[in-house]
Image: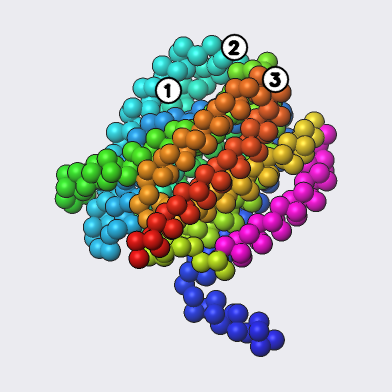
């Protein structure tokens, strides 16, 4: 009893511990809501329709990665090094102006893609894709919030950004299922319409609460531009290879299959495995600002992260089979086998991110870029070899191997940096 009281007292007095538990709880609740939402959507759309839904989302997510040009990471760096609250508001305002410019560039590219891509035409998704493009700013603004709130330690608002859209979409998905399921309408269009509306409402609400400032806008944009040249572009180049090629995986499945059902199976398997990465990711995110002052990652912090992550992996393996069969049905049984493969890779990526956050907090943009290029090439090569041969199973195997490549590369750069610090002292 005394031990429990002691741990509770330490938790109450430790602001970082509160943030870790709070953000992790939000992530878990968000995953549970996402799972419930996916059950409803898969029942409404079926395997092929759900695959179409995920395929389109993959393209927009990939476009955001390609056309961000490092500006979000540059703003991230500016906020990490800033202690002035008014100046922080001005950085948010400057980044918002930059985000508007990026939206114009992305929209032009996506219009050209919709007009000339044969796969979209063959699967009869081109017209619908063009309809979504004017609302694609929601994908950019999500990246804006996710990157900047971490650097500014706005964990409360980061939690809202991660949770509120999921709650809104769940409520609308329930509404759609019970009201529109017996009507002869374009189901994919209905789901996407409600998704975009809920995302837009929540993000506009968060922007209103953020109370950004446009004072000294030219000066702040110039500062972000400078940070982009020294840090943001390095991380961006890495993201193109690592995150970009990772997002490309789902798109490639579509190009080597007669329909998009495999995209849906792979995405679901990945969704169930995603909480595994949240444990190391959440702990590293809430310690991001602290990492900039640490000579190395505390061993106790790493051991706790490892123990929690391995326990979660075993728990997932025990429940995934019965869960899929009961709630999704036999037509989604492929997800079970894919999840066993993907989950190991996701956990490896999570630990790669754990060391990545430390390097990022210490301004090691080139190390992040080089590591991301290596793992990105691994993802691309493995995907191009195995997806044409094995479809979604090839994508799962690529995720597994590339996860370990990413983790090993990040550990290598971490030890290289920390040992270099020791030798200098």
- Read off the residue under disc 1: 110
- Read off the residue under disc 2: 122
Mark 3 and mark 1 in contact? Answer it, CB < 8 Å.
no
As drawn, the residue found furthest toward the bottom would be 2
Q: Residue 345 sits in which quadrant?
A: top right
- Read off the residue under disc 3: 389
- Residue 346: x and y in percent read 62, 44
Secondary-structure class at tag 1: helix
Q: The C terminus appears in which quarter of the rendering?
A: bottom left
Residue depicted at 44% across the width and 58% down the height: 419
Where 3 falls versus 381 (above or below)? below
Q: Does the magenta stretch include residue 303?
A: yes
Residue 97 is at least partly visible in this image? no
Where 384 falls versus 331 (above or below)? above
Mark sitting earlier along the chain (3/1): 1
Mark-to-mark CA distance, 1 and 2: 17 Å
Secondary-structure class at tag 2: helix
Q: What stretch is highlighted in magenta?
A: 301-330
Q: Which of 23 and 367 is in front in this view?
A: 367
- Residue 299: x and y in percent read 55, 66
């Amino acid at each position: 009893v005394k031990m429990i009281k002691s741990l509770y007292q330490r938790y109450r007095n430790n602001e970082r511990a509160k943030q870790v538990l709070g953000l992790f709880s939000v992530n878990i609740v968000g995953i549970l809501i996402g799972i419930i939402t996916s059950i409803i959507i898969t029942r409404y759309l079926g395997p092929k329709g759900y695959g179409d839904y995920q395929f389109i989302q993959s393209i927009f997510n990939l476009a955001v990665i390609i056309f961000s040009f490092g500006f979000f990471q540059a703003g991230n760096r500016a906020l990490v090094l800033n202690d002035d609250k008014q100046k922080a508001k001005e950085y948010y305002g400057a980044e918002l102006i930059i985000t508007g410019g990026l939206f114009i560039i992305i929209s032009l590219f996506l219009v050209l893609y919709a007009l000339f891509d044969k796969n979209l035409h063959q699967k009869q998704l081109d017209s619908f894709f063009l309809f979504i493009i004017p609302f694609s700013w929601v994908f950019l603004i999500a990246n804006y919030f996710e990157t900047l709130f971490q650097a500014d330690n706005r964990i409360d608002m980061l939690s809202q950004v991660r949770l509120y859209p999921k709650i809104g979409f769940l409520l609308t998905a329930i509404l759609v299922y019970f009201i529109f399921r017996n009507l002869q309408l374009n189901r994919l269009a209905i789901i996407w319409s409600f998704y975009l509306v809920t995302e837009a409402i929540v993000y506009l609400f968060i922007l209103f609460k953020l109370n950004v400032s446009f004072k000294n806008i030219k000066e702040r944009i110039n500062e972000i531009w400078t940070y982009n040249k020294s840090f943001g572009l390095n991380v961006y180049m890495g993201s193109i290879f690592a995150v970009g090629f990772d997002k490309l995986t789902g798109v490639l499945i579509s190009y080597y299959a007669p329909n998009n059902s495999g995209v849906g199976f792979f995405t679901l398997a990945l969704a169930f495995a995603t909480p595994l990465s949240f444990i190391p990711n959440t702990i590293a995110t809430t310690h991001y600002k602290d990492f900039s002052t640490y000579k190395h990652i505390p061993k106790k912090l790493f051991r706790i992260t490892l123990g929690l992550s391995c326990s979660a992996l075993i728990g997932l393996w025990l429940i995934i089979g019965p869960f899929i069969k009961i709630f999704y049905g036999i037509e989604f049984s492929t997800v079970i086998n894919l999840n066993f493969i993907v989950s190991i890779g996701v956990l490896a990526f999570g630990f790669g991110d754990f060391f990545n956050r430390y390097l990022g907090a210490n301004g090691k943009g080139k190390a992040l870029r080089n590591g991301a290029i290596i793992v990105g090439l691994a993802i691309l090569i493995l995907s191009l070899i195995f997806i044409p041969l094995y479809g979604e199973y090839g994508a799962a195997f690529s995720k597994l191997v590339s996860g370990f490549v990413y983790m090993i590369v990040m550990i290598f750069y971490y030890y290289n940096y920390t040992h270099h610090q020791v030798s200098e002292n």
